[in-house]
Image: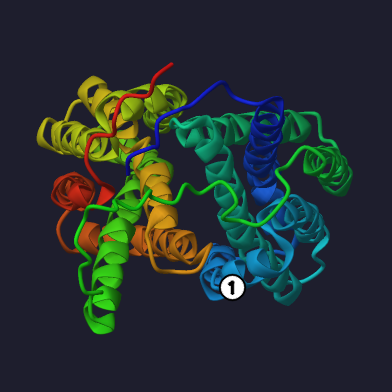
Amino acid sequence: MPFPERSGGVSPEARRARAAVSAVFLTNGALFANLVPRYPEIKASLELSDATYGTALAANPLGALLAGFLAPLLIGRFRSARVATLGIVVLALAILSISLAPALAVLVVVLALAGATDAVVDVAQNAHGLRVQRLYRRSIVNAFHGLWSIGAVVGGLMGSVAAGLAVPLPLHIGCSAAIFATVAIVALRSMLPGPEDAERVSPTPDPNASAAPPPRRFHAARAIVVALALMGLIGICGSFVEDVGASWAALYLGRDLGADGATAGLGFVALNVAMTLGRLTGDRFVDRFGQAVVARAGGLLIFAGMGLAVAVPSVPLTILGLAASGLGASTLIPAAMHAGDELDGPPPGVGLTVINIAMRAGFLVSPALVGLVAEATSLRVGLGLAAAGGLLTVACARVLGGRRPRAHL
């Protein structure tokens, strides 16, 4: 989607709001990541089997899918700033409850609550980040997602250190929850005031243009549905690549290619480091070439990277291919969210919510889909689905719009 040209510098208010949104994204990434390294302790304390443990964890994305539609209602009632920051506080309490769960039933409930809250926070923080982006008149949303990735790394390291030092789980999660909830509350003071569409620029009507009849309501609605479907597919392709790195890269490198434990973990690391770097630098490419061109290039990188990983069964080339795929996928979810938010027709937050639900559906379905294909054929073939997703991204990228006009700096 094109950006309006700038007519001056960025205001101090916008800069403060950008810093606040950055803090919320980083905090959101760090909160749940603190808990992940300590999942084995929760599994052991509740004496869960592998199957029961895996089923319980599925409550998190399931809760996100079921509650994601609440985001536009909450944003419309309370504004994205409050929903994002106060939602972080609720998320922190939900994650603390996970660490305190005394039984399987309680664990499932609080995991679902955490997933539902995270879905709402995700939509709200992106909605507010896109408000700030309109004030900047250039792309900054990829940097927000890059900070989320950095937060996830920071949270994961905090959790790993706490586990290594045998810090009691409730004490560790309670401290991290208090820290990040405080950061979110402080950030609220610097968020943008006013309605959600306050920064949108209405097109200037051309007095010489002849009046065209409005499109039929059915055709307009169908165009919106088609556009959101294509944007959702782009978000799913991005989430599919992320899940391949998290769920299957270490298994493929270790079991199928014979890498040792330390080397097998490098596939996940390479993909996520490349994805973080791509998000931190992606805004420059979006400003220069436009969302659609960057998404097509990303889709080709995913196809080439995952194609290399599955076509040539080599540990170094597979790690290289995973890194290329992470770089290619880095801007897809931010691009789909931006395009969905800018779509004419739906109320504020609805487009973002649809993309968010599609993305989370991708995270929920992709492990089972790859597993089924792997069981029927091989894991190499299952991972090849991610390469096909790269080509699907190329085919759908046109919905993201053309090259934007260069801003006058």
Q: Image check: 247 left or right of 145?
A: left
Whether residue 283 appears in this view of the structure is yes
Q: Establish if 5 lies above or below 76.
A: above
Query: Could you say where residue 406 lies in the image, as x and y percent from the top left?
Result: 31, 24
In this image, 297 relative to 115: left or right?
left
Residue 273 x/y as whole percent? 44, 25
Residue drawn 21% across the image and 47% down it:
397
Any part of residue 371 in sight: no
Q: Nearer the viewer, residue 205 or 124?
A: 205
Judge by depth and name the residue closer to the eye, 263 or 30.
Answer: 30
Quadrant placement of the N terminus = top left
Determine the image quadrant of residue 368: bottom left
- Quarter containing the C terminus: top left
Give the left or right position of residue 344, taking residue 187 as reference.
left
Between residue 223 and residue 157, name the one nearer to us.
223
For the point 25% across and 46% down, which residue is it? 401
Residue on which disc 1 sits: 67
Extreme residue in the left direction: 311
Q: Mark 1: which secondary structure?
A: helix
Q: Residue 282, image x and y in percent?
A: 38, 27
Q: For the view shown, which residue lies furthest in the front direction?
A: 208
Count of number-bearing discs: 1
Residue type indicated by callout 1 = Ala
Residue 40 in percent (x, y) is at: 65, 49
The figure's colour scheme reads rainbow
Where 400 falls versus 26 (above or below)? below
As rendered, which of 147 and 223 lies closer to the eye?
Answer: 223
Crowdedness near tag 1: few (<14), some (14–19) or many (≥20) residues, C-alpha within 10 Å = some
Question: Can you say whether 190 is above or below 71 in the image?
Answer: above
Which residue appears at 82% of the width and 57% of the height? 93
Residue lying at the far top of the rendered structure: 409
Residue at x 44% of width, y 32% of height: 139
